[in-house]
Amino acid sequence: MLIKPSINVLVVENDIGMMQKCRELLLNEGHWVRTAESVEEAVDIIQRQPSEADIILLSLELPMGGSMTLIETLQKARREPLIMGISEDCGEEALEAMEAGAYDCIRRNFTEAGFWVKMNRALETHRLRRQLGVLKRERQDALTKSKVHHDENILTILNSLTDALVVTDWQTNLVLFNRVAGRLFELNKNEVLGKPVSECIPSDELLSFLIRAVKMDSSLATLMAGEEPVITIGERTLQVHVDPVVSDAGTVIGAVALCHDVTTVEAMDKLRSDFLSMVSHELKAPLSSLLMQISVVNDGMAGELTEKQSELLSKAKEKAKGMITLVNDLLDYRRIQEGKSIQKIESLDLREILERTIELMRLSAEDKQIELTTEIMEDLPLFSGDRGGIQAIFVNLISNAIKYTPSGGAVRVTLTMAGKDIRFKVVDNGMGIAPEDLDRIFEKFYRIKTEQTKSIAGSGLGLSIVKGIVDAHNGTIHVESQPGEGTTFIVSLPTQE
Amino acid sequence: MKKIALVDDDVDFSEATKLLLQSKGYEVVLAHDGKEGLDMIRSERPDLIILDVMMPEMNGYDVCVVLKEDEALKDIPVILLTAVDQAFFRTTYSKHMGLMTEADEYIAKPVASEDLVACVESFMREA
């Protein structure tokens, strides 16, 4: 019946007949059996025997509540044996015993077959628990051992790091940290080693990353690379990189966190950002005066103008507008770099935004005698996005198409649904883009230099801004082009569920 | 004739804008800082107020707060006008954020002359 290796069973039973019966059954199958008639005797055996019992067959009807005492003692001592109760009717006392930690219970009037069904199940469970225990200990040992045998040199090296290093075992107990970590998190070696990291470092975020790392399948470990979240502890801002510690055998035995203090970098960023904002204000304010003055003079509000004067002022106005666009582009670009390309999410009617954009563009298209046509689908669903961002996508792509299409050409704008995506498409029959430039047009400041484009003004930021905004909305942008035949830009924006 | 109060420390911009609005048939009165602007608005009782945000003495937001708390003045529409970057607002002037809604219109500088006129006219029609 049993093909498994023999096991150690301790029978604790004051009914000698029952004890003998169990003993015989087990011995017949080649198992080791020891017996005890009382709790005291059982405890004595458990403590004395070097090899622990695998299973304890325990009468639940020992005098003076002895059965429960034994179960509780074993539980408290975190001993391994599985406890199988023996009771008259497996009633209340069996439930109580199982609640306290017993595995199962058999009736005194058991049949041989019934006895083995329950015993085999208990054995299987015991075997699995033991394997798990071995695995646990292996993992525990691996890092604890290394803690004991720290190589002095390695510690010196770790202490020389300018970043904080924290290592935990697989249960996220702190096992090692370097000098910078000690200073940063105010850790005292004698107090914190071996303690749960949650008690030592006050950051739920860090803890969650560590837990994620130790729970990770070692084969997935590389997936974490490149992910460097920023957390705040007290007044410090840290960029953390958490990796699982994987043993030679391939099991995750802990986690290592490297924390780079970016507090000053952040402060510098803020400073730079504020500085740029100030500069842009200082640039825009005089430009807006300039533009207003030119407009007023050119529109004849300060006296009649000759045709020549008016022509010169119109050119000056265009130049001033170009500079304003440049300042705005620089600001947009900075915002995207800072991850602020989405300022505010709201439900948008893209049809309305596009129609308004087209109205603005119509004039410059007419100036160049370019036929600007649109096809906008009825009943487009509302889109959750940033109004300014979406406008910037429309304006940049349409004005580019107009800019890079010679007089007499055509620009066609469509807004439709493609599956669950809203698709915005701008098709022109302009000068097109050479294949070698096609890959680079989304790079910042990249401008295609040809005889045809040299007279066209631009910052080289427009498309990188568009790309940044499309990315921020989880969309894609795609371009197709044939030099001399035209260019098509396709933006797909996923509608959220 | 409808009267517009323009409060902006940029004299060049103010003068040009004054010409623009006069040509559209409005009377325009000017002030060049927040305090002066507030005094002028109290004495002139304009039909519309255009306020720059970044000004010495008292900025446009603070002027707006005072106006909107004054029973006699709170119904005069206010257009806030500024070249300050929006993102910068949100950090530096965050305490004023609630006031964004208090102004009746918000226009970013530089503004095209025809847009400013269109905005002014929409308020004047309502009045």
Image (tube, grey):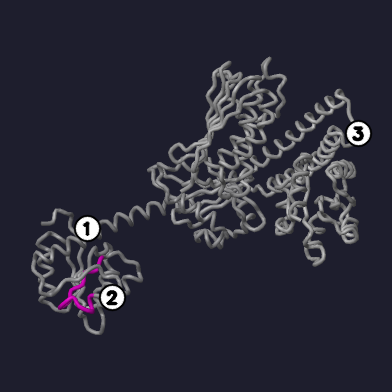
Residue at image point 64% right, 48% down: A261
Question: Is residue A355 visible from the viewing direction of this image?
Answer: yes
Q: In screen coordinates, is A312 left or right of A339?
A: right
What chain is tagged by disc 2? Answer: A
* Amino acid type assigned to the residue bearing label 1 in the image: Glu
Question: What residue is shown at x 75% (from left), y 47% (from top)?
Answer: B119
A423 in magenta: no
The amino acid on which the numbered mark 2 sits, given as a three-letter code, is: Leu
- Disc 3 marks which amino acid? Gly
Start and end of the magenta stretch?
A: A82-94
Q: Is residue B71 left or right of residue A410?
A: right
Chain letter behind tag 3: A
Q: Is residue A350 above or below residue A49?
A: above
In-front residue for pair A184/A383: A383
Q: Residues within 10 Å of mark 3 (few under 14, many from 20)?
A: few
User: Of tags 1 and 2, which is closer to the observer?
Assistant: 1
Q: Secondary structure at mark 2?
A: helix
Q: Are marks 3 and 1 on the same chain?
A: yes
Compare marks 3 and 1 and give the one earlier in the sequence.
1
- Does the segment drawn in magenta span residue A86? yes
Q: Secondary structure at mark 1?
A: helix
Q: CA distance from mark 1 to mark 2?
A: 23 Å
Q: Nearer the viewer, mark 3 or mark 1?
A: 3
Label number found at residue A124: 1
Residue tagged by mark 3? A303
| Disc 2 target residue | A70
Spot occupied by residue A328 in the image (x, y as percentages of width and height)? 72, 38
Tell me residue A269's x, y (percent).
70, 44
Judge left or right: residue A411 versus residue A253: right
Judged by depth in the image, the label closer to the viewer, 3 or 2, is 3
